[in-house]
Image: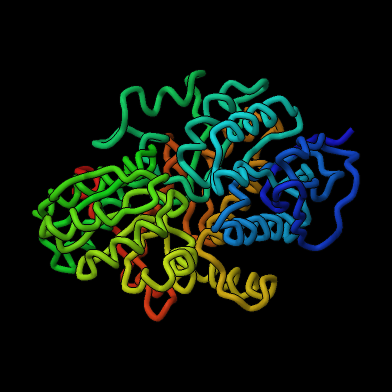
């Protein structure tokens, strides 16, 4: 019998009563290798005769679904380009959805169910995800206690600091509470929010903003990134007017917008997610406080959603994204982008597709260097040293944080995102964030 490894990915999207299967290079077939994950939240297995299964865990419904579908195409393409091989092992891949039609975004119950399913399926040796840090908080302890584990989770998008290390904006018990066995099983290829907060504060300073109003969506990520940016802003001498929570279920933010306007703030920072009624929030701020600049973190991606959901009111808005823009990737990244463009009809790849593809490369490298067990794959992740990856040099510290941490600030101009600045903040400011 072959050594068995199953990779679960978001290559198939589960969409309200039907499964949308996005394939790269071949049709699906019945599995004779890895054990399929439940169809309730996961698409069919790609390369079903593979030994080991990798699952991607991303929100495949809602306004940003097209972004995540592109990410799963990028993951599958990396596996296909490798011939579905990692050293002596053969890989299978399955796309899983952690969202619901009702929420239009990640769902806590689904995240818990998915993690339990991954842990129970012995053929799963790695998970690519999550997209949202709040979902990772739920899944990590379950995967950490998985049989024959821990079961590794590598995120292309999580930025909440407390998942990997302590900081000025983290909560009591973090990050230890996510690793009940005492062994780490998490890594990410993007900068954490202490870097993003420091970069956003640097951008505020560059824009000569002296008074900034902060909002947060009351979720772990939103509260955290708002506080990280507040801490860095204060370090740079910027006055923080207030930090106020917005209610995602509100039908109007006019009163909140007037509060921002009347405060004398020159700008507002939206710490949170676009799916938390962020489009309506931007509309009402623009209508009632038109002279106030708007800045937001990567929770407001894809930026195309900001444009669509605000009816053009996102014009001039700044959005930070942890990582380099596609056109500034190193040589290997440029080659990847040119190839991937042909798979998506000539469009410019979403930045997160590059991060997702990089995670796939990390798994290929780690699996090839492992003994094919969950614990072996997880241990090998922390020894990965990719010198010419899509994102450049990829190596993780013992906490699971990546070694390179640039942050790109985009500006919406003429309805499209353009690069305003790439910032790698100094460690002194990151430490304060």
Apparent side of residue 369 relative to residue 322 in the rendered image (left or right): right
Instruction: Locate residue 213, reporting x and y percent.
Output: 19, 53
**The N terminus lies in quadrant:** top right
Placement of 287 over or under 238, stated as above or below? below
Write the residue at 22% across / 56% down: 201
Write the residue at 90% across / 44% down: 30
Report the front residue among 244 and 364. 244
Report the front residue among 339 and 138. 138
Apparent side of residue 309 relative to residue 209 in the rendered image (left or right): right
Apparent side of residue 428 relative to residue 183 in the rendered image (left or right): left
Instruction: Locate residue 95, reporting x and y percent.
Output: 70, 47
Report the front residue among 347 and 282. 282
Instruction: Locate residue 406, reporting x and y percent.
Output: 36, 59
Placement of 113 over or under 223, stated as above or below? above
The reply to whether residue 52 is in sight is no
State which quadrant residue 152 falls in.
Answer: top right
Placement of 423 over or under 396, stated as above or below? below
Its colouring scheme is: rainbow
**The C terminus lies in quadrant:** top left
Write the residue at 59% across / 48% down: 59
């Amino acid at each position: 019998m072959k050594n068995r490894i199953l990779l679960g990915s978001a290559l198939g999207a589960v969409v309200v009563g039907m499964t949308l299967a996005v394939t790269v290079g071949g049709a699906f077939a019945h599995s004779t290798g890895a054990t399929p994950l439940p169809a309730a939240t996961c698409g069919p297995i790609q390369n079903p005769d593979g030994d080991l299964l990798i699952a991607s865990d991303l929100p495949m419904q809602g306004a940003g679904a097209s972004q995540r579908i592109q990410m799963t195409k990028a993951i599958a393409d990396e596996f296909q380009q490798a011939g579905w091989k990692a050293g002596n092992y053969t890989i299978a891949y399955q796309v899983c959805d952690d969202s619901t039609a009702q929420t239009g975004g990640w769902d806590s119950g689904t995240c818990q169910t998915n993690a339990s399913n991954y842990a129970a399926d012995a053929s799963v040796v790695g998970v690519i995800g999550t997209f949202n840090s709040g979902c990772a908080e739920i899944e990590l302890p379950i995967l950490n206690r998985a049989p024959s584990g821990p079961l590794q989770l590598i995120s292309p998008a999580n930025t909440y600091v407390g998942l990997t290390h302590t900081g000025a904006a983290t909560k009591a018990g973090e990050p230890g509470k996510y690793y009940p066995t005492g062994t780490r099983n998490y890594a990410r290829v993007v900068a954490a929010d202490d870097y993003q907060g420091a970069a956003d504060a640097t951008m505020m300073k560059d824009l000569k903003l002296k008074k900034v109003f902060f909002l947060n969506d009351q979720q772990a990520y939103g509260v955290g990134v708002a506080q990280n940016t507040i801490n860095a802003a204060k370090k740079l001498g910027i006055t923080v007017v207030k930090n106020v929570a917005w209610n995602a279920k509100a039908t109007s933010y006019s009163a909140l917008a007037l509060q921002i306007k009347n405060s004398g703030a020159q700008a507002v920072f939206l710490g949170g997610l676009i799916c938390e009624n962020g489009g309506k929030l931007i509309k009402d701020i623009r209508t009632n406080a038109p002279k106030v600049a708007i800045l937001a973190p990567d929770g407001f991606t894809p930026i195309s959603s900001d444009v669509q959901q605000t009816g053009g009111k996102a014009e001039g808005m700044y959005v930070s994204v942890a990582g380099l823009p596609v056109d500034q990737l190193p040589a290997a990244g440029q080659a990847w982008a040119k190839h991937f463009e042909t798979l998506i009809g000539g469009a410019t790849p979403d930045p997160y597709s590059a991060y997702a593809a990089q995670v796939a490369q990390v798994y290929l490298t780690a699996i090839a260097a492992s003994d094919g067990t969950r614990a072996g794959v997880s241990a090998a992740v922390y020894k990965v040293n990719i010198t010419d990856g899509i994102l450049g040099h990829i190596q993780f510290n013992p906490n699971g944080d990546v070694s390179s941490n640039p942050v790109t600030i985009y500006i919406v101009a003429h309805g499209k995102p353009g690069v305003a600045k790439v910032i790698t903040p100094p460690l002194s400011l990151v430490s304060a964030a």
